[in-house]
Amino acid sequence: MKYYWGQKMNISTSNLAKEIEGKLYGPDMDLKGNFTFLNTASMNDIVIRHWINDKGIQIAYEKGVSCLITQDAKDNSIQTAQELGLPLIVTHHIEYATAYALKHSVKAYAPDAFKMAVTGTNGKSTTTHLLFTIFSDLNYNTYTNTDAESEGNTLIDPRVSYELAEYYKSNGEIEVISLEVSEVQGWDDKLMENHSYQMIDALATDVSVITNASFDHMNLVESFDELLYEIEGAARALNNQNKETLLVLNYDDENIRKMNNVVLENPNVTVMYFGNYDNEKLLDISYKENEGIFSGNTLYIEYGDLPFTSLHFIQDIMAAIAVCEYKGLDKDKVINSLKGYKPLARRFIKLRDNPVIIDDFAHNPSGIQLTIENGAKLGEKLFVVDAIRGSRGDDINCEIAEALANTLKDKDDYTLLLTCSRDVVNHLNTVTDNELKVFTETLDAKGIEYTVLDTLEEALIKSYELAAEEDVILLLGAQGMDPASGILAKNNII
C-alpha cells in the first residue's frame, strides 16, 4: 500500500506499543500523521522524544498530537497524559520507535527509491555526500541526511523520518536515498546495541557501504571486537532483504574485508571491493598512485580529474564509484559530477594560503594520523592545533593522544597546540580534568612537546602568529574545533 501525506497508518496505539516493546498509557486508537519532534508536530502527528515531562505532555495535547512515545516519562507525565486522554507509549528502547518510524516513512514517501547506507569509522559523511551529489547531478530526486556535523545519522531521534516527510511534501516522491549511519551510538555512555543494523534494516537498503574500522566510541563499547560487531551490522542487515543488494567493502582494511563472510551464503548479495591497485589481485575499484581510479583494469577517472587527492578521501571516491558501477550510471556524467564536487565543511578544507591552514574533522586516531600525514606535505614547518574531545571519556582521548604522538614523533619540525575550547563548547562537550590529564600524560610518556591553551581562540591566534608563510597549520578535532573558521574570520586571518 502506498501512503500519502497524513494518510492513516493502519496501526493502533496498542499494536504500536507491542512493535516497539513499550507500554501504552491512555486510549487505544488508530493512528495517522507523521513521526516527528515535539516542536515541529502538527495535528495527528506521532511525537518521539527521549524524555518528556508534564509540560511536554500539555504542549503535545494542545498541538493535537495523536500519540507520544518516550523512554523517560518524568514527573507526573503518565498521569497527565491519562487525564488528557493522550496516548503515551513508554519504551526502554527509544531506538525501536525511531527505527519503526524510519521504516514507515520510507514506505510512505520513498517506496520505490534506490536506497544506500554508508557506515564505518571514517569517511562515511563524505562518501554519503558524494553519492548524494552524483545522483542529484544525474537528476535523481535524492534525499540525504548527512551534513557537516553528522547529527542526523542516529536512531536517537526521528530526524530522518521527519525530513523524509518534509522532503516529499516539497519535492514529491523520493527516487534515491543516501543515508549516513553512525556505526556506534549510545546515550549517557550506554551502548545502543545493533545501531547500524537496526537503522539499515529499517531503511531496507539496496546498498551497504562499510568504509573502515578504527578506535572510536570506546566509551560505549568494551572492546575493538565489539566495535567491529557493531559496524558489521551493516552487512548483517542485508540478509533480511529478499532482493538483490550490494555490499561495498574496503579491501585494504583487513577487518572490513572479512565482513564478506556475513553474506557469503546469501545469493542475493553482490560484494564489491575497493582499495589500492594490485595486478595480482584486481579489485572491483582500485587506485593507482598518480594515474587515477580504475574499474577492474580500466581507468575510470584520471588523477587530474579527482576532486581531492588525499588518500583517505580517494577511498571515499572509490566507494562511491563502486555504487555507480553497480547501478550502471553513465560514466561521463559521474566523472563530470566528481570534477565539480564541493566537499562538506571541515573535510580537509583549505581556509588560507601562506601559511596554509587546513580544517579537518579529524576526531579519532586514524583520522588524526591520515590528516597529519597528508597535511604535512603542504608546507615546511608543521603546526597542529588539536581540540581535545570533551565528555567522551578517557579511552578515546588516550587513543587520540597516542595517534598524535606516533604520527608526530618522526616529523623534523612541528609545534603541537592543544585546546580545551572552553570558549565555544557546551556542557555536553566540556573537557574534564581527567580527560586533559590522560591526554597530556600520554604525550609526556611518548616524549612529545606541546602547549595547552584553554580557549580555541587563543590557540588559533597563537598558531597563526608562530607560523611563517611557507608553513602549514592543521586544525583537528570535532565539536571543539567546529567554530574555528568563524573565529579566524573574526580575527581577519581568513
Image (tube, rainbow, N blue to C red):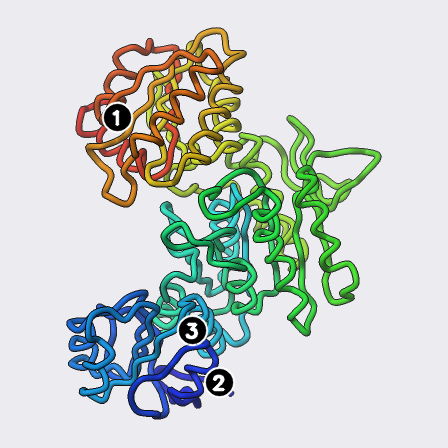
Q: Which amino acid does label 1 sit on?
A: Ile
Mark 3 or mark 2, earlier in chain:
2
Left or right: 143, with 489 as reference point: right
Density class for disc 2 (Cα within 10 Å; few <14, some 14-19, many ≥20) is: few
Q: Between tags 3 and 1, which lies in front?
A: 3
Q: How far apart are marks 3 and 1 (CA)?
A: 43 Å
Looking at marks 1 and 2 on the same chain, the residue that comes earlier in the sequence is marked by 2
Q: Which of marks 3 and 2 is in front?
A: 3
Residue 325 vs 224, above or below: the answer is: below
Relative side of 232 to 145, left or right: right
Image quadrant occupied by the C terminus: top left
Residue occupied by mark 2: 2
Residue 65 is situated, as x and y percent measured from the top left of the image, at 25, 81
Whole-Å distance between the Cαs marked 1 and 2?
51 Å
Label placed on residue 31? none
Q: Nearer the viewer, residue 21 or 118?
A: 21
| Identity of the residue drawn at 23% across and 19% down | 461
**The quadrant where residue 233 appears:** bottom right
Q: Residue 414, position in %: x, y?
A: 42, 11
Q: Which residue occupies the foreground of this view, 337 or 400? A: 400
Mark with earlier residue (3, 1): 3
Residue under pointer 3:
101
Secondary structure at badge 2 equals loop
Residue on which the image places disc 1: 494
Q: In this view, does 385 lie to the left or right of 20?
A: left
